[in-house]
Amino acid sequence: MSKVQLEAHTQSETVNQQVDFNLEQSWINRVHIAADSLQTERRKNDSAEFERKFNDAIFTGDRSVADDLIRHVDNRSVFVWNEPILIDFDDNQQINPKKLLAFSVPITTLLKVWREVQNLEYQIDWIFKRIEAPKGKAAETYNQPICIAVRSQIDLVNSWQILVNPRYVYYDEEIGLLIGVNIEGNNFISPNKPPKQAVNEYQYQMDTYVGHLGCMWKCWRESFSTIGLKNGTWVKTEYGSVRHELLHTGGRFIQQKILTQLTITQAEELFEYLVLLAIFTHDLGKLQVKWQAVMRGWQAIAHSSFKGKPPKSHLLAHTDYNPEDNQQKHALKTYEAKHKRPNHAVESAFLAQYILQQSLFPLLQNEFNADNQQIFGIIYTVILAAGRHHSAWAKGWEAKEIRKIGDIQLDSEAQKWLESWKLKDNYGSLVTALCQTFAENNHTQPISEIVAELFFQQTGVKLPEIAAAVKIYLPTHSL
C-alpha cells in the first residue's frame, strides 16, 4: 500500500513540489485507513469486554488485564552504566536511569542475546538487570529505582527498563549499539555528571504540610520551567500550567460522559474543584502521629548533621534529603531501620471519604442534579487519586481493610487545625483561600491575615485568632 501511494505521487502533477507535513500525513492516513477501520469495528464489538477489563484494572487493581488495555510496543528502554562493579553483587543497588543515555531496542534482539547466554558452556556474571521502581512500603519513601537481576526469559519480557552489562556492549555513532556475549565492550561511558544548578529529581527539601498544598495548587494554576535530564542530556524545559493543558479536556469528559446536562463552563468549574479536592486530600495520611514523629526525627538529624532546616513543631510534608550524598544516604537508611515510616497514601484515601461525603456529595446532588451512581463515580475518582498517587495499583482503603492497620491517629497540631477552623463545614472555602494566597506573589500583609480575609468574604465566618490556630508557613521550594 505504501508503494502504491509513492507511485501515485510520482505520476501526479505535484511530483516536483516539496513533501510537507500535511501531504505526508495524508499518505499515512491512506495507508492505515483499512487497518484503523478494522480496529474501530473490533473496539465496537468488544466494548463490553473492554469495559469489564477497564473496571477490573482501575477500580480493583487487577494488573493481569492491564496489558490488554495498553497499546503493545515491542521495544524496551536499555541503559548502560559505566560502573558495573557497584551492581555486580547487589540486587538492590539504587540507580537514576535519567542520568543514562537510553536506547530503544526490540525485545526480539534482547531475547536473542538472552538465548546466547543460556547456551554458553560457561557462566558469566550477568547480562541484564531490570530497573524497577520501589514497591510496597518502599514506594512511599525516598528510594530511587533499583536494579534486580533478570533470571528468566519471562523476567526479560516483563521488564520495560533494562540495564545491560557494559562489558558486553559496544557503541559507535556510525555502527550503533551492539550487545552480545561475543561483543568486546569499548568502555562506553555515561553522559557527564549533572551541572550543579540542576537538582536530582529524587532530592527533597523540607516543606510544611500547608506549604506543600500551596505549591501543588500553584503548579496547577501557573506555568513553570525546570532543568531535567532527557536521554542523559540536561535541557531546560518550559511548561505551561497544568490547568491550561487539562481544564478543557477534563470539562469535556465530565460533560460528555458523566453529567451531560452541564454547560462546558459548568463542567470545567466542577473539574477544577475536583482537582482542588484531590490536592487537598492526597496527603491527609501524613497528618498521622507516627508519620509526623518519624519525619520530624529525621529532619532533626538532617538539621544537625547535613545543614537542613530545623523541624520545630511544623506539620511536615517532606524533609531535607539528598540521595547523592552517600553519608546522608547511609544515615537515612540507618534511621529508617529503627524508625519505620507508616504509609500515607491509602490512609489519605480512607480519610478523604469522610470529607468528600460531607462536602462533595451535597454539592453534586444539589447544584449539579447528579444521581447516586454519578456521585459515587466522581467521589471514587478523587479517592483513587489520593490512594494511588504513589502507585497505580494501590488499594486497601475500605473500612474493613483499614482495620488491619489499626487506628489512624492524627497529630495534635492537625487536630487543632481541623477543629479550630471547622473544616467539615467550610473546608472548601478554607482551601480555596489558602491556595489563592499561595498562588499570588508580593504580599503586602501577613499570609495568615490574607487567608482570614478571603475566608471571611466567602463564608461570613471569622477564623480563630492566630494564637489559637495552626500557623501557616510559606512553601520552601517549588515541587
Image: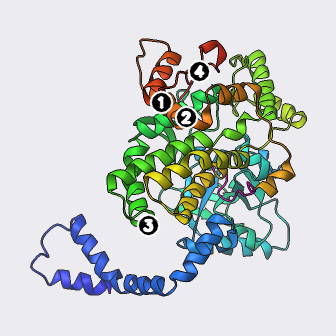
Question: Residue 222, located in which quarter of the rendered image?
Answer: top left
| Tag 1 near tag 4, CB within 8 Å | no
Residue occupying the far left of the picture: 13
Q: Which residues are magenta?
A: 389-398
Please name which of the two marks, 1 or 4, marks the residue nearer to the observer. Answer: 1
The numbered dot on residue 257 is 3
Q: Secondary structure at mark 2?
A: helix
Question: Horizontal and vertical percent for residue 388?
Answer: 65, 53
The numbered dot on residue 426 is 2
Name the amino acid, label 3.
Answer: Lys
Name the amino acid, label 1.
Answer: Thr
Please name which of the two marks, 1 or 3, marks the residue nearer to the observer. Answer: 1
Is residue 391 rendered magenta in the image? yes
Is residue 122 rendered magenta in the image? no
- In this orientation, which residue lies closer to the viewer: 43 or 357? 357
The earlier-in-sequence mark between 1 and 2 is 2
Name the amino acid, label 2.
Answer: Asn
How far apart in space, not on screen, are marks 4 and 2 (Cα)? 18 Å
| Tag 4 near tag 3, CB within 8 Å | no
Is residue 93 something one can see in this rendering?
A: no
Query: Residue at the location (39% across, 81% down)?
Result: 36
Residue for badge 4: 472
Residue for badge 1: 459
Question: Residue 344, located in which quarter of the rendered image?
Answer: top right
Query: Residue at the location (76% across, 29% down)?
Result: 411
The earlier-in-sequence mark between 3 and 2 is 3
The earlier-in-sequence mark between 4 and 2 is 2
Image quadrant containing the C terminus: top right
Query: With respect to residue 428, does 475 lie above or below?
Result: above
The earlier-in-sequence mark between 1 and 4 is 1
Which of the colour schemes (rainbow, by chain, secondary structure, one colour) is used? rainbow
